[in-house]
Amino acid sequence: MNKMDVAQLARQRLQSWLAEAIYYWRLIGSSGLLFTVVVLLIVGMMYYEDLIEWIPEQTPVIFILSLIYTYLLTRTPQRTFLKEADLLFLTPVEEKMDRYFQVVFRYNVLLQSCGLFIVLFLLAPVYIDRMPEESHGLWTYYLVPLILKGWNLQSGWSVLKLHNDRLIRYHALLRGGFNFLFVYWLLAAGRFVFLPFFVLIIVLFYVYERRVNAQHAYNWLRLIELERHLQSRFYSFCNAFVDVPHLQSKVRKRRWLTWLSGWLPFDRSQAYRYVYTKTFFRANDYLGIYLRLSIIGALLVYLLDDPWSRWLIYLLFLFLAGTQLRALWRHHQQRFWTAVYPVAEEEGKRAFMWLNGRLLGMQAIIMFIPLLVKEPLGGEHVMLLAAGLLFAYGYSDVWLKKWFERKK
Amino acid sequence: MRSLLQVKGLTGGYTAHKAVIHNVSFDIHEREIVALIGLNGAGKSTTIKHILGLLKPHQGTIQIGGITFAEDPQKYRSLYSYIPETPIYYEELTLWEHLEWTAMAYGLSEKTFRQRVEPLLKEFRMERKKHRFPTQFSKGMKQKLMIMMAFLVQPRIYIVDEPLLGLDPIGIRSLLEWLVQCKEDGAGVLMSTHILATAERYCDRFIILHEGRVKAQGTLEELRALSGQTHASLDDIYLQLTEDASV
């Protein structure tokens, strides 16, 4: 074990992770997401300037931008690529692990900086539109948040050694507050007198973290749990597009939603509907994805005036929800009890089609309602809703049936 | 006594060209508990998977209540319930919902379900855990969930795969007493186990599986006669029979 090169191990794990991630991204790219993203980008670009002009004068744009960047800066997911077995095999070389974590830390900084840069870039026109005249220069708009990102990752990493969850949360909260002040000061071109104040706070953070670092060892259980969580989040994201075999599902209890499946009659024919409905509400955030698509879709349909774009977006978001929900079907494939219990496999398919139809129908209505607020009801609106409901029916009851037959 | 489960000349395994068990035959009747014993890799789990209908026999037939799996899968499955060796559950369902779902799948009425579920929760001391998710359970509690799911159905025959590991002593007693009660009510039980002392006390007959074949079967008396040791325990008989074979 003495000769073990942990940095080399970290690089190996990073490489195999990258290979896997690239594999999944390629599958996702060919699954229709790419097409959707391109369509959204084109529609977005067409309207971007109008949107910026449309923002009312009194909107606190800089305040909102600061909030967005604060969120992106303060959340610092730390991938470590640790595995459960490391508890046995790597703990003996604990004193060398700094070198391992350095390698993965660089990956985290690079990846998250890229993400932050993209958002900074996309929102830059909004900022330029409102940039104060005495601004510190556009280059600081890019540079300072990127440096802050690195600092946040370092700072967030060092307190992961703590055993007290609450302390970690307070630390993140303080960090968030500081990020906000700093970014707001930057974007609003605050006076230079405040700069020493920010530096002082960073020094205070540093002193505290150094103490934590010296007093605590790595919290292996937390790091492994965190890694498992982040990894399964990536997999469940991929699972929305392609089949991910080794997915550990994530369950949220959502007790307040229990009543939604409570009205299903207690009957054999409902057994699969029962399982699918519960799964939809609790597992892998199917519900969250569905709601996000519905709300964003509703918002876009409300904002777009051009009938063509409106129709396109309306149907596109129904289609997207349909493709996302297919993961719910795969969720219960190859499950043991469904193979052993006396319920026919056909029942499962019917139950899935049933739930799918209800959900897409609901979404068609959700995305339609804001239009009624905006404009008086006209023939075009009725057609739109009818098309949406027809799509929900056609997709769930005709297309899915064919899909099942093809899969046999 | 009527035969509930009939295994006749069963040869089978996980792939079509490689058999793991060979020419296995036995019967389980009403009102009896039969132990299926054998070393690791003797073919117990494979035999059970065939009985459940998860594997297709290469040769031979398996009938529950007179029908084979191929004849009517749904009817066939509704006649047994199964307690697996390692707990298998849905992360997204609570304990209570597992039970409710089981009742629905087996076509129990809501009234019957409510009548049966409370005594079970009480016996296995899980009343206060009923709205929890099994992910948060210990191995023993997960095992109790499996046991309750099986007992809720009250089928003709129980297939029980090594149920004792991980259970606390009270849980073991509850399980065994409940199995005896089911037997007295007319059910048949096939129980695979390594714990021979328990098997000797609770089981009416024994099937000794060795390297994929039935090495011996019968009551304790019959096995004693076969081995020529009149006062031997199941342990001794079992060791003698399997060691002879490997020489």
Image (tube, coloured by chain):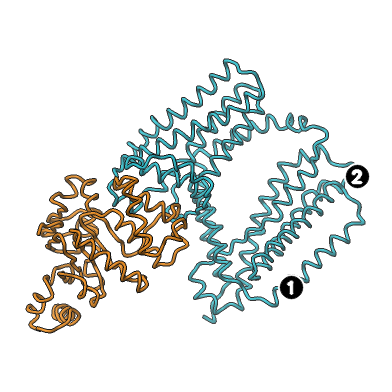
Identity of the residue drawn at 33% across and 46% down: B111
Which quadrant holds residue A199?
bottom right
Picture coordinates of residue B232, whole percent (x, y): 14, 83
Whether labels 1 and 2 share one chain: yes
Q: A57 left or right of A400?
A: right
Labelled disc at residue A210: 1
Q: Tag 2 or tag 1, which sits nearer the N-term?
A: 2
SS for dot 2? loop
Q: Which residue corresponds to mark 2?
A: A134
* Nearer to us in this view, A14 or B243: B243
Picture coordinates of residue A327, whole percent (x, y): 45, 44
Q: Residues within 10 Å of mark 2 (few under 14, many from 20)?
A: few
SS for dot 1? helix
Q: Which chain is orange?
A: B
Identity of the residue drawn at 53% across and 59% down: A17
Can you name the residue that lies furthest to the top here?
A379
Is disc 1 in contact with disc 2, using a CB cutoff of under 8 Å? no
* Nearer to us in this view, A213 or B96: B96
**What amino acid does circle 2 point to?**
Glu
Q: B14 left or right of A333?
A: left
Relative to A29, residue A52 above or below = above
